[in-house]
Amino acid sequence: SVIWRHWLPVPALAALLLFLSGPCGAAVPREPIVFFMGASETAGYGLPSVASAFPHLVAVRCGIVAIVSATPNVPTLLRQPTNLAHAGGVVMVISFIDAYVPAPRGTVRRWLGSFVSAAPTLIMTTPPIGEMGVDAPTLALKQRRLYARIDRDARANHAAHISLALPAPPTRFLQRDGIHPNALANRLIARRLEAWLGSKRLCPVGHSPKNS
C-alpha cells in the first residue's frame, strides 16, 4: 500500500491536507506540489529524523509542497500514487530493490508516459551496489540492465535522469549498513534536486532557507 508522509512546515501541511481531503473545489496550495516516490532512501530510513531526508530539505529550501510516497523495502516500481492532480513535478527514485523484486516489463515506459504528461519528471537512480562494496554479482547485473532500460525509456519520454553517485570515499556518505545515504549525502542529493527544480522554475534561484 502507499504511505503518504507529509514532511512539511505546518502551514504547508495544513494546506496539503485540505487539498487531499477536501471536496471538489477545495483550495489548492499556492506552493508548487512535487511528488516524491521511492523506497527506503526516500523515506529517510536510518536517519535520526525525517527532517534530514532530502524530500524535507527540498520542501523547506524551495518552498514547495512535497507529497512523499515511500516505504522501506517496497520497490518503487510496484507502487504508484493515485492522484497527480495539480502536480508541478514528479521525482522517482529507483534503487537496487527495484531490480531485486522486478516489476513487469514495460512498467517504466508506461509510468513515464503518464508522469511526463502530468508534469516535468525526474528519475534518480541510486549507485550500483557493486560500487558500495556489496558482493552480489547476479543482483548487480539485474540492476545494470534495469538502469539501462530506465535511461532508454527516460530519453524516449523526455524525462530527466540523473545518477545519485556519491563522491569518494563512499563510506563518508553512507550509514553503517553501507547502503543507505547518511545526512551528509541527503544534503548533496537535495542540492542536485534543487538544481533540477530550479530549471523547471519550481525552486527560485537564490531562495533563502526558511530554517537554518
Image (cartoon, helix red, strand yellow):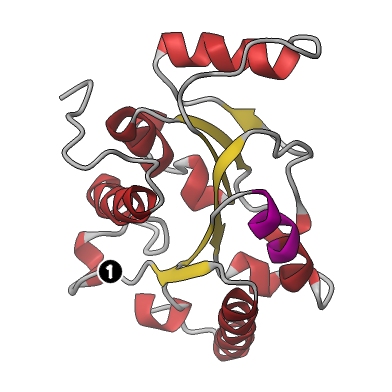
Question: Could you say which is closer to the camera, residue 157 or residue 148?
Answer: 157
Q: Is residue 87 magenta?
A: no
Q: Which residues are magenta?
A: 112-118
Q: Quadrant of residue 59?
A: top left
x and y percentages locating residue 71 in the rendered image: 63, 43
Q: Looking at the figure, which quarter contains the C terminus?
A: top left
For residue 152, side relative to residue 43 (left or right) = right
How would you rate the neighbour count of disc 1 (Cα within 10 Å): few for under 14, some for 14-19, many for 20 or more?
Answer: some
For residue 38, side relative to residue 196 (left or right) = right
Q: Residue at x 30, y 59 (%)?
A: 174
x and y percentages locating residue 191 in the rendered image: 26, 51
Q: Looking at the figure, which quarter contains the N terminus?
A: top right
Question: Could you say which is closer to the camera, residue 14 or residue 143?
Answer: 14
x and y percentages locating residue 25 in the rendered image: 75, 12
For residue 180, side relative to residue 170 (left or right) = right
Question: Could you say which is closer to the camera, residue 193 or residue 72?
Answer: 193
Q: Is residue 84 above or below residue 176?
A: above
Q: Does residue 89 show up?
A: yes
For residue 56, side relative to residue 74 (left or right) = left
- Per the image, label 1 sits on a secondary structure element best described as loop
Q: Quadrant of residue 169?
A: bottom left
Q: Does residue 75 show up?
A: no
Q: Residue at x 54, y 84 (%)?
A: 136
Q: Residue at x 64, y 80 (%)?
A: 156
x and y percentages locating residue 135 in the rendered image: 47, 84
Q: Which residue is under mark 1?
A: 166
Q: Is residue 170 above or below residue 144?
A: above
Secondary structure, magenta segment, majority class = helix
